[in-house]
Image: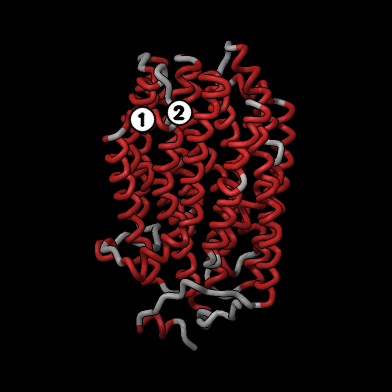
Amino acid sequence: MPTSLPHPAPEPSSRSHLDTEAILPLLVRFSLPAIVGMLVNALYNIINRVFVGRTVGALGIAAISINFPIVLMMMASSVIVGVGANALFAIRMGEGRREQAEKVFGNAALLLFALPLVLSIGVALFIDPLLLAIGASGETLPMAREYTLIVLLGAPFGSFSMGMTHFIRTDGHPRTAMSSQILGALINIALDGLFVLGMDKGIAGAAWATVIAQVVTTLYVLSYFLSRRATVKLRRKNLRLDLSQIVLPFLFLGLPHCAMQIASSFINTVLNRSLLQYGGNLAVSTIGIVMSANTILIMPLLGVAQGAQPILGFNFGARRFERVVATFRYACIAVTAYGLLTWALSLGFAPAIVRVFSKDDAELIALASQALPIFNFMLPVIGFQIITSTLFQSIGQPMKALLMSLSRQVIVLLPLLFVLPRLFGLDGIYASFPSSDLLSAMLAAALGWREVRRLRAGKVSFTLGLPASPKEASATSH
């Protein structure tokens, strides 16, 4: 049974705007930059698909789409560290334990660069077998190999810059976090235009545009933490890994989002192979376009979740449970309203959305226009599931958050991807996604409502309470 939190509430001196400002304007102020940042971040792969699709053609889109499971694996290393460490960082800041918070930050900074570097080397050593295993064909393998090997060079920089934006936001500068992501996207767009259109470098040009943009964004993020604006500092002593007290707890918190990324990578592999079987390279290109458009539509939902996360975590650490519940309620209302709007847009403007990626391939446009509304049929309920998972992660219950993530990506979706295509062909592949969204949202409703009642009663579990140093203990005791 959950019990009341064992730690006393922090002294008023450790309070901040995160637990004093009105919830709705605070959520708006944190979510809007996060939404813009998430949209911009999604543009990295989508911009490349637009330029390649309009110059190289359908096979170029297929080659980049084949690469997506590898991209998701790289992102998983960033997510488990960046999201997990930031959740623990926000809780510690809410408790007034700044020394512990800075240790979390330093350990995260090191791992955000090191983990994807190691993974990139491993992928490069086995590049052809990996690409063939995740759905490359004889036609797409050369282009997919060329694109992937270049993009891997930027993976550590992309991971570091993306992970650090979470800390910039929690440090009280959501607009700076947004600016770093906008900067990267603008550089990517400009270099795509130069390399792909101006210099006719094709797939390789798009890949180099991404790598350069990621390096520049990393330098921008580092400049923030070396400036006077940052209240949390990147100190050399905090780069020494503390596995038991720091790393394992935040990896545990980041596990749900990491599992979601890994599951997405596996699902995309299954999806690519099924598409190749039931529709060939054209079907792979079709879903590449649909996934790109769908990413843009879903990113604002993730942006609201990112904006809510530091507010949820800080107030949980500060024992302000009524503010945790209010933040959860407002976030759920926002994502549901947005989901209804974008669902209507995807129904009414599917051909126009698809033509952004392909201007003259009539068959590709027709197939993608048919698939997009089916994929997004349950968009109004996806956001609720995402916010509920974020709630569990922010209050130190990663196993429930993990269940929420896996319910949508693996537990329901994977069996459907094996069964429905055998019955309905390509339409079965399309229908698997909204069916999974609906069932996982029902699970989120049951678990989320139960947790809200516990929070209102003050009966919550705190499974990640770390021992405080003597200095910190005296700061948080009455």
What type is the residue that disc 1 sits on? Thr
Q: Position of residue 39 (x, y in %)?
A: 54, 39
Would you say residue 456 is visible in this rendering? yes
Residue 44 is tagged as none
Say which of 97 and 72 sits in front.
Answer: 72
Tell me: 340 left or right of 407.
right
Residue 135 is tagged as 2
Q: Quadrant of residue 447?
A: bottom right
The image quadrant where one finds the N terminus is bottom right
Gap between marks 2 and 1 measured at Cα: 14 Å
The residue depicted at 33 percent of the width and 61 percent of the height is: 106
Q: Considering the numbered disc 2 on the image, is that residue within a helix, a strand or a loop?
A: loop
What type is the residue that disc 2 sits on? Gly
- Label 1: which residue? 148
The residue depicted at 69 percent of the width and 41 percent of the height is: 435
- In the rendered image, the vertical position of residue 426 relative to residue 69, given as above or below: above
Q: Residues within 10 Å of mark 2 (few under 14, many from 20)?
A: many
The residue depicted at 61 percent of the width and 59 percent of the height is: 26
Q: Residues within 10 Å of mark 1 (few under 14, many from 20)?
A: many
Tell me: 449 left or right of 418.
right
Q: Position of residue 276 (x, y in %)?
A: 52, 24
- In the rendered image, the vertical position of residue 97 relative to residue 110, given as above or below: below
Say which of 79 and 437 sits in front.
Answer: 437
Q: Considering the numbered disc 1 on the image, is that residue within a helix, a strand or a loop?
A: helix
